[in-house]
Amino acid sequence: MKKVFIKGPFLTQSGYGHHARTVIRALRSREDLFDIYLHPITWGVTSWLWEDNEERRWFDSVLEKTIKYTSETDGKPMFDVSVQVTIPNEWEKIASYNIGVTAGIETTKIAPQWIEKSGIVDKILTISSHSKDVLVDTVYSGTRNDTGEKIEYRCQKPVDYISYPVRKFDTVKLDLNLTTNFNFLTVAQLGPRKNTEELIKCFVEQFRDNEDVGLIVKTNMAKNSLIDRINCTNSLKQTLSNLGNRKCKVYLLHGYLDDNEMASLYSHSKIKAIISATHGEGFGLPLFEAAYYGMPVIATDWSGHLDFLYKSVKQKNGNYKNKHMFSRISYTLGPVKEAAVWDGVIVKDSMWAYPEEGSIKMNLEEVYKDHGRFKKRAKELQKWICKEFTEEKIYKKYIKAIYGNDLVEIEREEIPKVSLITSVYRADEHIEQLMEDVTRQTIFKDKCEWVILNANEKGHDFEEEIILKYKEKYPENIVYKRLDEDPGVYGVWNEAIKMSSGELITNINCDDRRAPSGLERQAALLVTNPDIDLVYNDSYAVKEPNTLFENVPPGTPQYNFEPFSAEAMLRNNLPHNNPMWRRNVHEKHGYFDEEFRSAGDWEMWLRASTAGSKFMKIDSVLGVYYFNPEGISTNFENLGWKQEEEKKIYLKYKEMLKEENNLEIIL
């Protein structure tokens, strides 16, 4: 597990705040890989988040953990990786390996300060191919004073780009009081880059005499305060006063809208298209969101948003070609406006797009007159975006980029069928959450069959009620049988294995839990290591029942197992509570010995490993082991016979290992 320090404005309502939260969500999806620490920073004069939700409460808990860890290490904490989501000017050398994450630039050139700062980090991640190209292609030429040699000054670190993911939300009722039936939407902060005044001017001049057309300007200048609203109102009034009389409407929509409200805006029946006359975008998040909600897009044919507004289409010859799926505004490139020059960020001799006035008006008119055609194209784009920009795909890219090349990832289609086996006996307290925990596994629906055998005596029916409820929900995945008598846990396992059909097998204990990606990670390692028969991993050891993986408190002790070896197998049952193994282990070495009540799995794995099976440890925490005071192996009252079982097994295999391998066993 890598200790990752994330620095960024993730508590702000800024674009960089959204970017930082995307990175954090990606890493949260694999908390089996990452031990996350957070450091919030401000972003300009943007407002901070105020919502009280699960994510915000998680942020607060991790901030407390970060403060505690920092204080315990005398202000010199050790991190494996730092991920710094901000402009390059603010990157630092914090950890052993440092990753700079930036939205990049909407112009044609980065500042020399960015090139200098790129030398501090080990890798750069940006948000679009446009931003990547500018970071890579910017070159400053010079001459060395001492030798007169011509030199090029450019970014030398690897640069890659990862887009935002699709995140859809339920709609809510919005009281917009629209008096016009056909409305365009623009989402843009008032400022030089967004070119909002020019857009308003073109809109009014095109629809001056049309009383049924409106333009909704979702905007602010800085913070979403009352003063900011007054300033925005005055600015728009001044712009409109210079344009003369009009029948068309311009609406100001000011302030923060949450995800559900923004979804409602993009889905509103009277809002027909989104338009941006921006000079450039690092990515263009509002355009992306509108596109994946199926809204027609009018935008400048330049910069970051082209990654998702052009669809890759296969041609008859087998080659792929990018097809535009939006209404394109023509432009010319020219020097950035003086008001936009930002020392160390936007350089004076860089360029950006100047949308052509005639093209803005033409596109507005075409979408208005032939909306059905553009809506049809938008639906096609929506389908493609929702397939290619899923959270799963985008998060995997971040995980791979931040974890490093030693992360084993395969396509889910390559994973064979996995059989889960469960013995149910007196598990009332755990059964409901067990069913929920297993069915949320990332590969459950597509790759798993779950054989559940109920060994309870008649009259003890609560577990069966819960199991049948889930079997009705997942009829293709869950196999359920009520046994006439209890043959013991290993007898149940053997029968479940014989009933199952998966190439891979794992036991699911009623009182234990797993990382949501635990089964997928175990299966992936077996697929990529065909000489390995069984994989195992470390687990958290908790004393509270029904502790989900993501709810394990900071500082919880772990069962940290040794790497596999014959001697280590004698010292401990390395696979412990949640291994995954190949079915052919039983074909080669038999089934669990039903003579044993508690240590039968240890005997099984010693038998297999002594006969030549190879095991492998995954260097991650993937399980949650509940130290159940009523459990067979953990109940103090069972200590006597449990120790006798373990002694019998230990002596048998110690002698076998000595004889077969001439080993000196030192314990």
Image: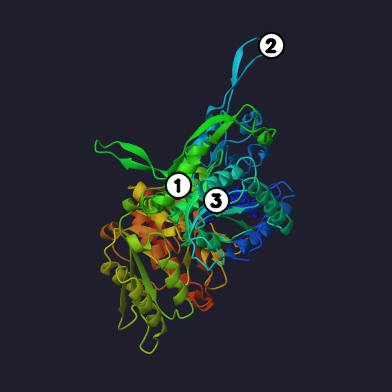
Q: Residues within 10 Å of mark 2 (few under 14, many from 20)?
A: few
- Residue drawn at x 49%, y 38% is 358
Is 348 on the left-hand or right-hand side of 454?
Answer: right
How far apart are the alpha carbons under marks 3 and 1? Answer: 16 Å
Q: Secondary structure at mark 1?
A: helix
- Residue drawn at x 35%, y 79% is 468
Residue position for label 1: 365
Q: Check whether the beta carbons of the residues at disc 2 and disc 3 lie within 8 A of each other.
A: no
Q: What amino acid type should be assigned to the residue bearing mark 2? A: Asp
- The mark found on residue 186 in the picture is 3
Is 397 on the left-hand or right-hand side of 12?
Answer: left
Measured along the vertical axis of the image, is residue 434 above or below residue 251? below
Q: Quadrant of residue 535?
A: bottom left
Tag in front: 1 or 2:
1
Q: Residues within 10 Å of mark 3 (few under 14, many from 20)?
A: many
Measured along the vertical axis of the image, is residue 344 above or below residue 393? above
Q: Earlier in the sequence, mark 1 or mark 2?
A: 2
Tell me where residue 189 appears, x and y as whole percent. Answer: 62, 48
- The mark found on residue 604 in the picture is none
Residue position for label 2: 146
How far apart are the alpha carbons under marks 1 and 2? Answer: 61 Å
Q: What amino acid type should be assigned to the residue bearing mark 3? A: Thr
- Residue drawn at x 71%, y 56% is 230
